[in-house]
Amino acid sequence: MRTRQPAARKREIRLVSQSTDISTEGITCPAVSPRLTEWVPALLAKLRPYTERTIRDHATTDPWRTSSQLLAKILPAWQNTDNPWTDDVAEAVAYTRAITTLALTYGDEPSSTRSPYHQQRHADLTDTVTTIGTGRGPVNADLGALAKGPVALHRELDDQPGALTLLLDGDAWTALTDRRTGVRALAAIAVLADGFDVRLVASPRVRRHLSKRYPTWSECHLDLTASRDRSPHTNHAQTAAAAWEAIRDLDTEPGKRRLLGNLKTEYDRSYRDLTTDHAIDVAEGTISRYVLDLEARDLVTIDRRGQHNTVQLTDLGQLAVQQCLDDDNDLVHPDQRRLDGSLTGTPQQSTSTVSPRRAGRETPTLDERVATTGNPDADADYVQWLTDPTNSPDQLHKRFSTVAHDDAISLVDDHPHPFDDGRVAYLSHTNNETLIVLQWGGPLATLGRLAGALLSEKALSKILSPSRLGQEFEAIDDTQAYPTDRILRRGHQVGWYSDSETTYGAWRERITTVRDRLLAQVAELTDSDDTAARTNLFKDLHGLIASATQLYHAAGVELTTTIRLPDTDALTRNPTQLQGLCTFLAKTVPKQSVYGIHAGYRMLFEDRPAKLRRRLPYEVEPDTQMDLTMSWVLAGPTVTELSEQITTALTRELSNVREAIADGTEHAPPLKIPVVDGTTYPAIRRVIEDIAMTHDVQWTPRERQRLVRLCLRSFSPADTHQACPYDVVASLLGALNESPTPTPADVERAAATLSPTRFRPDLTPSATKLYATLLRADDPLGRSELIEQAGISASSYDRRLSDVRDLDRVTPVQEGGHRRWVTRTPTPPPVTAWLPASSDQPAPPLVTHRQSTIPAGPNSPPPDYTGRDDRGRWDRQPPISILTEPGGNADYTTHPMTTTNQSRQPNSHAHQLADTRDHPHDTMTPTPHPTTAVATPQTRLPNGGD
């Protein structure tokens, strides 16, 4: 039997995981933190003997001549006297001189045989070698010195790159608050990869953190690693004609077309994933034959280096899928597709692209497209992908994912269109995040839709796939402390996972059988009066959903569910329906909790002895809390007004912890479920921070503050300071399509492409259309042009022009003796404009995304630092204080946050936070019994506290 050879070394960054055959040979650097000075010197110290041996293998002459020869190769311009050295060149020269002297003068000579002079000189040279590029070297140079020194040296001398294995310190990376520190460390890793084969060891949690907080770096160096190994025959200039020639004779091969249509260029898929993909529906023994045929056509490339072969599209294959296959994977000639596009295409490539609407053609809004579900009784699916032919999937995904606060229930005032068929649920997935979008249909129906989406054939084929979970679920074991089956069964408390279902195939067959049985009961009992049967079904559905979310969490996938409530008015008028919604959240959300590998609900609430005996032992770390396996968003008109009822229901449910927890006999981490208003100043600020982070937009704090005010002004109804975050996301993404660093004026121009009911709802519809037309125009417009392009009548123009010309950005100009209108880029107001007219106090500090907006009083609970991404903590009030020790007796003073706003000017900065003082009469009475589970109400700060 032939022994499998290790993967060839390459100068790049590669992730080391259980699914790869990449070893951790060579130099290993543990505990790599985001701070360079904590690990680069140690790495250079370990690299030093290897570098010295390499130099001795290439030269045995005196150090000065050898270093000069090396510098001539790695820094050809180092002897150029016309230009002074930069710090990185100077430090690279010092490094090369030092390492050559260490190699050829001192070698392996024991330090005890050296004179005091040489001992000191040896120590100085060693310090030069191990501090280069860290900012603490001879001239305090940055990473340029690292690139021009040791990296360039080894790139020149090594025939085969040396292997460096870096073990990331997960806690240090996830707890880091200053993103710039992490950026610098990742840049150092990328610099090292220019001369070495860098193997990166990171847990799934850290990989998720890196891809979320440093998306550009992750995409370049981690997510697209496989794509670097494509066939060398891949040609980026392939034409549609070449793609048609490669695929045209597959008209009688539907299986191959389905296989091709379900592959991607961004990532590869294993053969076993393709075998279990219901959308491909090809027998296991046939997959390999089909893939080989597609490879021969240069449509796919196969990676045969790992334990399991993987396949992905070439550029020609991607072109064939885009130009020669329709949505049903049927052949269509590229010329026909272009013709269809010219006849039916939308005015812009995506809803976020900034371009004027075409006259006479109404383009469906993004929400209208989502609401067009089709009929499942005809040919539509009950679970559909959240995609649209005219929109890239990531735009829709970001629209729904960005507004969600981690580990919380977010409330968003929106006006969603009712689904054509409320039984449909949407599914969207990126590498580490899954979204579910569904419509409220009552507690039982909604639970059924959620369970059906989480465990749908689409989810099992594309998300909870064999390659993600492992053939025996070995891929989810991140601790090695217990066997995988014990972690899932007694830690995460995954149900329907017996000894006979420990393989992926057996588990999938069992779980789909359970899913189908329960969904059939949902259809039967939704309108039934059989209380006992409905109660049992609720229990089974809660268990199925909790098992699914625990499995997603164990597999490293973050979950967010958006529940749309198109008619909250009818819901609030009916006490029974409102109670049903609150009870649904109170009973469902806490069950989706986890602490490490332990199901949170069983730790806190389970009181059945038999169930309690089937748990893994755990230890509670100080200053930690439980996480939710799923974040939640409720979207509907005035849904933020339900915050108090939802918080009350959660508080009541979370107070019913197990008696041993309540009396302090048994310890457990707290479970906090904030209810967050997603429309306030802090929430909109968080959305802007999130998009800036994921797109690497370098807005200054002042610019971000102006953007928040712009969004509140653009999307807030009259006399309110609350904006729909969906509109904020759409506008920011639209502006980013036009510029990598859009200005507030660019963002407002993008916002003007939204529906008139969404943009500037404080104006009348006709005035909004006029203003939006001016924002989108490149040149000044006169009366007739405005009437035509805005699509309004002359009388509406005459009535509403005064409203529009009063806006700050609208300015009249004279052209050819006629008055025309144009929008000007606003000048930012001075800092003193934020102060009241009578104030002689200095301006308040700018609020950044790491500053708390919670006033600190003498009885304020301390901040909670858990090492998790706490961007969502902006908008949250201190949690309801519930005693955690028996016999405690304390009152907690609340601090009111009030504001007044008498100005309706768009650029007004007169919103000032009132002085906050203690009010002894505003006290919260202690709870009747202690508990560690609390519900956290929302905070509504109209002006962000600035």
Image (cartoon, rainbow, N blue to C red):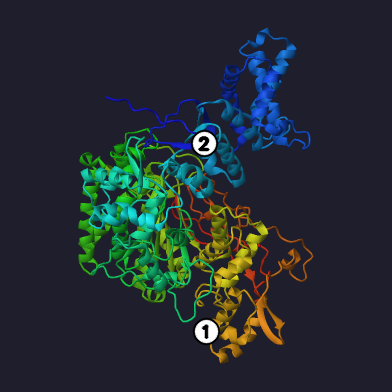
Residue at image x 28%, y 50%?
A: 277
Q: How crowded is mark 1: few (under 14 residues within 10 Å), some or many (20 or more)?
A: some
- Answer left or right for 621 relative to 471: right
Which residue is denoted by mark 1 in the rendering? Answer: 791
- Answer left or right for 841 relative to 431: right
- Whole-percent x, y for residue 439 in the image: 35, 67
Q: Give above or below for 230 relative to 709.
A: above
Numbered mark located on residue 169 in the image: 2
Residue at image x 34%, y 37%?
A: 304
The kind of residue on which mark 1 rests is Gly
Residue 757 or residue 859, whichever sits in front: 757
- Whole-percent x, y for residue 268 in the image: 37, 45
- Whole-percent x, y for residue 122 in the image: 69, 17
Please report contact status of discs 2 and 1: CB closer than 8 Å, yes or no: no
Q: In which quarter of the image is the N terminus?
A: top left
- The residues bearing labels 2 and 1 have C-alpha atoms spaced at a distance of 59 Å
